[in-house]
Amino acid sequence: MTPEIWITSGAVLALIVLSFLFSGTETGMTGASRARLHSLAQGGDSRASLVERL
């Protein structure tokens, strides 16, 4: 196999992994309860505050 094929295959694999990451993040954010996020943010959870601002 030539180096170009290895580079292209690596790039495609990296993009697929990034796609999985972004899809999972989107699913988690749309499935999160707004009331629970607000409650956690009021309790001092900095990650909940960040998601609430988004």
Image: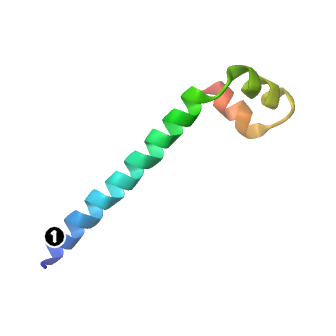
Q: Position of residue 52 (x, y in %)?
A: 67, 26
Q: Give the residue drawn at x 57%, y 36%.
A: 28
Of residues 21 and 53, the one nearer the viewer is 21
Q: Which residue is mark 1?
A: 5
Q: Position of residue 10 (x, y in %)?
A: 28, 66
Compare residues 11 and 16 and report the one nearer the observer. 16
Q: Residue at x 50, y 34 (%)?
A: 26
Q: Is residue 32 above or below residue 7?
A: above
Query: In screen coordinates, is 29 left or right of 1?
Result: right
Colouring style: rainbow
Please tell me whether residue 35 is drawn above or below residue 1 in the rendered image.
above
Q: Report which quarter residue 23 is drawn in.
A: top left
Q: Quadrant of the C terminus?
A: top right
The residue under the point 58% across, 28% down is 31
Quadrant of the image occupied by residue 48:
top right
Q: Quadrant of the N terminus?
A: bottom left
Mark 1, residues whose alpha carbon is within 10 Å: few (<14), some, or many (≥20)? few
